[in-house]
């Protein structure tokens, strides 16, 4: 017997992402999915962001890693609630993993939810988590050629944080070329140089979050 | 390697549907995989083999086969209308050089059919 099924394999993921999105809209929570290769500085940026904004906003963080609770511990030390997802080998977070831990987060009491994705410039770009915005972090030691080399990641994100600008005197990173390459791949995306170490450019990032939060509140 | 999780999803869908048809054993699964769907056929074959061998998904046993039908990537230029095979997501028109061609084929990742008894 032959059965014609014609079923999209991503159907379950799409459904879960839609479920998450509806929930976030209902509670008016701004959800930011942060992606990068390992070591670009996602956790450091989040620690600093949480310290700067937790007086103004109720913040929660979901930490995705292949193993360990370490990043969630770092975020808790910075002063906010964090849930760790250990993917046990999976190279990305998918919307069902998020849906599973949402009961641990009081969304009604959360203005901003940050999701730190698993360190990887490829796979996480393919999964919609139901987030409000996707942000990619690229650090200067990785080189500006990572933008054309990983076009999908820069195609699906709205903001590219160029982190570790404090290292620009020591590593070859061409900001102008990075801007040109990003413009070619995704003219809607914005490039923002920051340093989680020196704090350079960090106000631009904080303002971007505040504006995004404002936009979330509009009916 | 997210193909492992996606293959599990696909085989669970087939397994459930097959049970609904009273089928005990699935012999062949046919997938359509687009060149721009971000799933790698080799990784899918590897994952299929793993599930086939462990037999952990009901109805998908040792004799099951996987067929992958390729769907080529195609984009259409927004300026001159030329259809071409895009190289990743830049989709640069080979005639006029305009980026942002509209992808018209190649993003499919679908279970087309399955056979069994
Ligand atoms: N020089 C410099 N180092 C940084 C900066 N941001 C993060 N780091 C360092 O980069 C390393 C990896 O950071 P981490 O936040 O764990 O990266 P993640 O894997 O993306 O979460 C740590 O040693 C950080 O201290 C920065 O702006 N400048
Ligand atoms: Mg981290
Ligand atoms: Zn053209």
Image: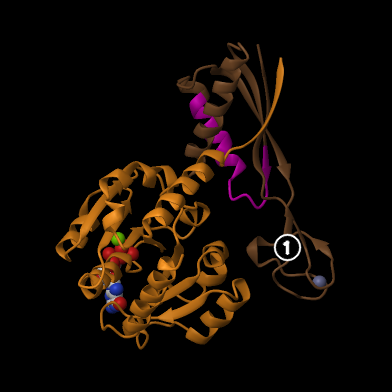
What is the magenta range? B32-51
SS category of the residue bearing label 1: strand
Q: Residue at x 60, y 18 (%)?
A: B18
Q: Residue at x 46, y 73 (%)?
A: A160
Q: Residues within 10 Å of mark 1 (few under 14, many from 20)?
A: some
**What hue represents chain A?**
orange
Residue A208 placed where, x, y %? 40, 77
Q: Residue at x 44, y 71 (%)?
A: A215
Is A12 contained in the magenta span?
no
Most extreme residue toward the bottom, as rendered? A169
- Residue B110 can be seen in this image: yes
Ligand 3 sits in which quadrant? bottom right
Residue occupied by mark 1: B102
- Judging by colour alone, the chain drawn in brown in this rendered image is B
Above or below, comparing residue A214 to residue A94 in the picture? below
> Relative to A63, is A147 on the left or the right?
right
Expressed as whole percent of the image width and height from the top left, the position of residue A29 reads: 36, 60
Q: Nearer the viewer, residue B82 or A19?
A: A19
Quadrant assignment for the N terminus of chain A: top right
Q: Position of residue A103 (x, y in %)?
A: 29, 44
Q: Is residue B10 left or right of residue A110?
A: right
Residue B108 relative to residue B93: left or right? left
Residue, far front: A219
């Amino acid at each position: 017997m032959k059965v014609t099924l014609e079923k999209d394999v991503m159907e379950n993921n799409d459904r879960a992402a839609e479920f998450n999105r509806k929930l976030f809209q209902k509670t008016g929570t701004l959800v930011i999915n942060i992606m990068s290769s390992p070591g670009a500085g996602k956790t450091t940026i989040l620690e600093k962001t949480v310290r700067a904004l937790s007086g103004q906003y109720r913040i929660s963080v979901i930490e995705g890693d292949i193993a360990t609770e370490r990043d969630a511990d770092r975020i808790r030390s910075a002063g906010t609630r964090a849930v760790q997802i250990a993917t046990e080998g999976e190279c990305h977070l998918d919307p069902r993993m998020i849906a599973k831990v949402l009961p641990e987060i009081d969304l009604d009491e959360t203005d901003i939810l940050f999701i730190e994705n698993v360190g990887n410039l490829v796979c996480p770009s393919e999964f919609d988590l139901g987030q409000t915005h996707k942000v990619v972090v690229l650090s200067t030691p990785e080189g500006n050629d990572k933008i054309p080399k990983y076009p999908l990641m820069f195609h699906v994100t709205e903001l590219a944080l160029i982190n570790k600008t404090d290292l620009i005197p020591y590593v070859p990173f061409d900001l102008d070329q990075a801007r040109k390459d990003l413009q070619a791949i995704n003219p809607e995306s914005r490039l923002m140089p920051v340093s989680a170490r020196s704090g350079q450019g960090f106000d631009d990032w904080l303002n971007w979050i505040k504006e995004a939060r404002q936009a979330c509140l509009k009916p | 390697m997210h193909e492992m999780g996606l293959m599990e999803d696909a085989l669970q869908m087939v397994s459930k549907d097959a049970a609904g048809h009273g089928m005990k054993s699935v012999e062949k699964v046919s997938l359509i995989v687009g060149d721009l769907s971000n799933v790698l056929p080799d990784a899918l074959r590897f994952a299929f083999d793993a599930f086939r061998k462990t037999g952990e998904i009901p109805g998908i046993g040792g004799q099951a086969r996987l067929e992958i039908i390729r769907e080529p990537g195609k984009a259409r230029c927004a300026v001159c209308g030329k259809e071409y095979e895009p190289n990743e997501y830049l989709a640069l028109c080979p005639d006029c050089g305009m980026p942002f061609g509209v992808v018209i084929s190649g993003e499919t990742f679908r279970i087309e059919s399955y056979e069994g008894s």
